[in-house]
Amino acid sequence: MHQMEQDRSENTALRMLGLELPTDPRWVNLAEKDLEEILTDHAYCEQKAATSCITLIQRYPDKREMVEALAPIVTEEWGHFRAVLQELAHRKLSLGYQRRDEYVNALRDFMKKGGSREERLLEELMVFALIEARSCERFRLLSLYLNEDSLKSFYHRFMVSEAGHYRLFIDLAKLYFPEEMVKERWKEFLAKEAQIMKDLELRGDRIH
Ligand SMILES: [Fe+2]
Ligand SMILES: [Fe+2]
C-alpha cells in the first residue's frame, strides 16, 4: 500500500475504535520474529477474555441482558483460545506460560476504587471495551502487514470478532448508565489508555 494511503486507512481504523494513539508500525515486525511468543500471549488474552466474562456474570447475575449477551461471548472467546492452540500445534510450536499483563494491570489501576457495585460495573465495562478495541487494532495490523498470507487471514477473523465485542461492551454501558456519563468516562479512559500505550515498552512478544 502507498504510504499516504496507508496512513489514511490507519487513521480511519483508529477513529472507528476511538483510540487516540496508533500502534508503532514496527510492532508487526517484532511480533513476526517469534511466533511461539506472540501466539502464546495471544492465547492467554483469549483465555482471560473468557474468564473475565464469566466473572462479570458471577458478579452481576441481576443484569439479565448482560448475562444473556455475555454467555455466548464466553464460548466465542474460548473458541478463539482453541483456534490459537490449533495454530500453535499446526506450526509444531508450544503454548508457553502466561506472563504478567502490564497493559491490563495499568488499565485496571485507573478504575475508580470503592464506589457502589453499580458504579464499578461502568468501570469494568470501560476496561473490557478498551481491551477489545486495542486488540482489534493490533489484530488489524497483523492481518494487513504480516508476511504470511495464512496468518493474515487468521488474524483478520479475530479483528472482526473483537470489533463486535468492543461495540457490545459500549452498548452494555449505555444500557445501564446515562449516555453522557458513559461518553465522559470513556473519554477519560481513552486518554489514559493512550498514555499507558506510550509508556509501555514496545515488545514483539505481547499483543498489548
Ligand atoms: Fe477474542
Ligand atoms: Fe473479544
Image (cartoon, grey):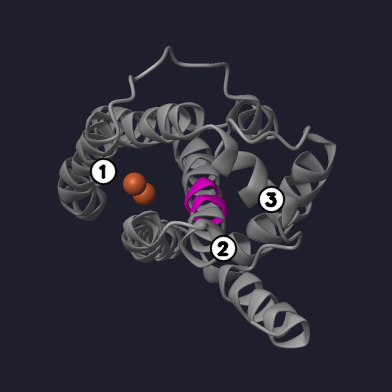
200 to 182, vertically: above or below = above
Q: Residue at x 77, y 34 (%)?
A: 200
Q: How far apart are labels 1 and 3 at the CA level?
A: 26 Å
Q: Is residue 166 magenta?
A: no
Could you give the CA–CA distance between mark 3 and mark 2, rounded to whole angstroms?
Answer: 28 Å
**Residue 34 spot, x, y in % from top left:** 53, 32
Graded by Cα atoms within 10 Å as few (under 14), some (14 to 19) or many (20 or more), the crowding at tag 1 reads many
Q: Main secondary structure of the magenta part?
A: helix
Query: Where does residue 21 sit, x and y in percent of width and height?
Result: 76, 59
Q: Which residue is mark 2?
A: 145
Q: Which residue is mark 3?
A: 189
Amino acid type for the residue under numbered disc 1: His
**Magenta residues?**
131-135
Residue at (45%, 65%) from the top-left corner?
Answer: 174
Please name the amino acid that badge 2 sits on: Tyr
Residue at 47 percent across and 45 percent down: it is 128
The image quarter containing residue 44 is top left
As drawn, 43 above or below 195:
above
Label 3: element kind: helix
Viewer-proximal residue among 124 and 46: 46
Tags 1 and 3 touching, CB below 8 Å: no
The yes-or-no answer for disc 1 within 8 Å of ligand 1 is yes
Q: Nearer the viewer, mark 1 or mark 3?
A: 1
Q: Nearer the viewer, mark 2 or mark 1?
A: 2
Task: Please tell me which of labels 1 and 3 falls first in the chain.
Answer: 1
The residue under label 1 is 80
